Amino acid sequence: MKIAVLGTGTVGPALAEALDALGHDVVIGTRDPRATVARTEPGATGGAPFAAWHAAHSRIDVVTLADAAAGADVVVNATNGASSLEALTTAGAENLSGKVLMDVANPLDFSQGFPPSLNPVNTDSLGEQIQHAFPEARVVKTLNTMTASVMVDPASVAGGEHSVFISGNDADAKETVRGLLRELGHRDIIDLGDISTARGAEMILPLWLRVWGALGTGAFNFKVAR
Ligand code: NAP
């Protein structure tokens, strides 16, 4: 499958690497490809600088947001949640039309410091805002409830015995995402319903952040026991 991963933080490279290893045809999208591949500062969470990551994964092309989305069957939104609508607008509505848009972003608002709040929240969600802004895209919210390393290697936590959620309006798009999640090793995939259910998935974040603070590690996940 041709997959465009929009995002060069922690999540984008992790998902791109994992999906490439699974045999997909993956590109990374960024605002300024030349500047991004020249980045030598460490990632926000202390990960390898993008230049070093790219040197080790040179077959994954780094292109503009629009070029990445234009050639893809599936587009992954792994951009900063506060800027996702801007990033997707730059990618181009015409390049997202008809595509499965797998949204892993969280609308974290750091304007009042840490811990961040969510914006939007309660009666709206980033997933819904993206679907509203790009009505021809088939948005599926998923994977936003766990750290990047767990997204791509769920077995690293409790042998993979934990849950991942999907929300979206398009049944076929959700089936495509379900397939990708299974390929990544996720087994307990819970379909919450239409895209408005992304509110619930996004509102896990305040709890996720507190568990992270309590445990001192992001290497955990939530399990819906039943
Ligand atoms: P991040 O630092 O939140 O986002 C980096 C990406 O956002 C870069 O690709 C950057 O584009 C893009 N970006 C920033 N400002 C922009 C703007 N004004 N216009 C367009 N694009 C802009 O990276 P992250 O930690 O990998 O997180 C990615 C998303 O996944 C976030 O929404 C986050 O909440 C969510 N998430 C993260 C984790 C995690 O483990 N870190 C886990 C679950 C969910 P350039 O490439 O052009 O610089």
Image: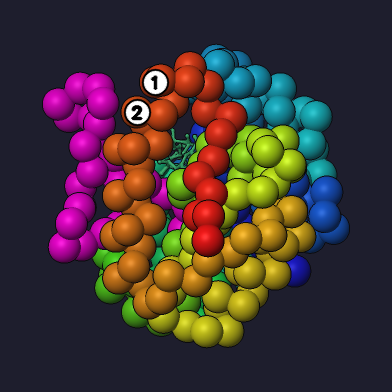
* Secondary structure category for the residue under label 2: helix
On the image, the x and y values in percent for residue 157 come to 66, 36
On the image, the x and y values in percent for residue 212 come to 44, 26
* Secondary structure category for the residue under label 1: helix
Looking at the image, which is closer to me, 159 or 179? 159
Above or below, 165 relative to 154: below
Q: Going by the image, does 145 lie left or right of 117?
A: right
Quarter of the view holding residue 71: bottom right
Q: Is residue 125 magenta?
A: yes
What span is in magenta? 102-127
For ligand 1, tell me if the residue under mark 2 lies within 8 Å: no
Q: Going by the image, does 111 lie left or right of 81?
A: left
Looking at the image, which is closer to me, 128 or 98? 128
Q: Going by the image, does 98 lie left or right of 159?
A: left
Above or below, 205 relative to 88: above
Residue drawn where x is 56% and y is 78% of the image: 173
Q: How is the image coloured?
A: rainbow
Residue drawn where x is 16% and y is 63% of the image: 123
CB contact under 8 Å: marks 1 and 2? yes
Q: Is residue 63 visible?
A: no
Above or below, 169 relative to 11: below
Quadrant where the image shows the N terminus: bottom right
**Circle 1 sits on which residue?**
213
Separation of disc 1 and disc 2 at Cα? Answer: 5 Å
> Which residue type carries mark 1?
Gly
Dominant SS in magenta: loop
